[in-house]
Amino acid sequence: MSAFENPTIKSLINHVSVREFSDRVITEDERMAILEAARASSTSCFLQAVTIIRVTDPEVRAKMAEYAGNQAQVLNAPEFWVFCADYHRDERVCNGDVDLGWTEQLLVGCTDSALMCQNTLTAAEALGMGGCFIGGIRTKINEVAELLKLPKNTFPVVGLTFGYPAVRNDTKPRLPVEILCCENEYREPSDEELAAYNDTLCQYYTQRDPAHPLTSWKAKLDPTLKRERRPFIKEFLNKQGWALK
Ligand SMILES: Cc1cc2nc3c(=O)[nH]c(=O)nc-3n(C[C@H](O)[C@H](O)[C@H](O)COP(=O)(O)O)c2cc1C
């Protein structure tokens, strides 16, 4: 059997973000299995520097949806979890005798949280569900931290909606492996390789939404890369005890 037939690999390759969910209920058994899969995630230096906050209170959910830029999926998804980087617990275990505030620790907190969020999504997808990362929660990061009562040395890295899908897009073409993966040293892709990917992506988006055809990959990147990006984040992180040195 080809490795491409492996069910885990197939599920990973077929990933798409799902933003609309059916009424099908997630059973307790399914939810606990997903949580156990998340719990098993790799963690830097065994710090286990993540706390998941599962948002079930409709009022808190509504606030989170608003803070995430009025994303309906946050309101409507069967499950919405927030992955928080967390050194607060480690600090407690060490009776406060720790040296926190290093920028490296910020990277660790983000990495651990992102890994756990991805493992959660991978587990959900393995069960036939779908979901979507929600970075939008950082748009109102101060408000989110207050709403979730986050202590110092924690912060919300990313959210995740998941459930059984009502609507699934076609898989979005990623960079080809020849551009994505270099051997032994960094390789600049040629203009022709980039142009070919540009065409593939434009075709995908134009087919997905003919009313708004994509003219270039650059047009997709510009709105994100040519504007101020949450300039309040540094001050927020510093206030929470992160990236001070
Ligand atoms: C860290 C992170 C944050 C994201 N935040 C959002 C979000 O707030 N809202 C949203 O609709 N999609 C969000 N996404 C989903 C991306 O838009 C999506 O993964 C990307 O466009 C690729 O599409 P695909 O996952 O369907 O292949 C996020 C993805 C990541 C990895």
Image (cartoon, helix red, strand yellow):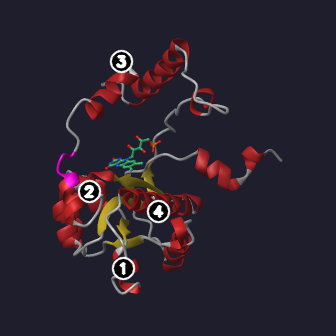
Identify the residue shown where x is 43% and y is 70%.
Answer: 49
Identify the residue shown where x is 76% and y is 47%.
Answer: 3
Viewer-side label of 2, 1: 1
Does mark 2 have its CB less than 8 Å from ligand 1? yes
Left or right of 59 in this view: 122:
right
Which of the two labelled residues, at mark 3 and mark 2, occupies the earlier sequence position?
Answer: 2
Identify the residue shown where x is 63% and y is 27%.
Answer: 178
As measured in the structure, the alpha-carbon distance from the residue carrying label 2 to the one carrying label 1 is 25 Å
The residue under label 1 is: 91
As measured in the structure, the alpha-carbon distance from the residue carrying label 3 to the one carrying label 4 is 36 Å
Element assignment for label 4? helix
Which of the two labelled residues, at mark 3 and mark 4, occupies the earlier sequence position?
Answer: 4
The residue under label 4 is: 112
**Residue 181 magenta-highlighted:** no
Q: Which residues are magenta?
A: 230-234
Which of the two labelled residues, at mark 3 and mark 1, occupies the earlier sequence position?
Answer: 1
**Residue 233 magenta-highlighted:** yes
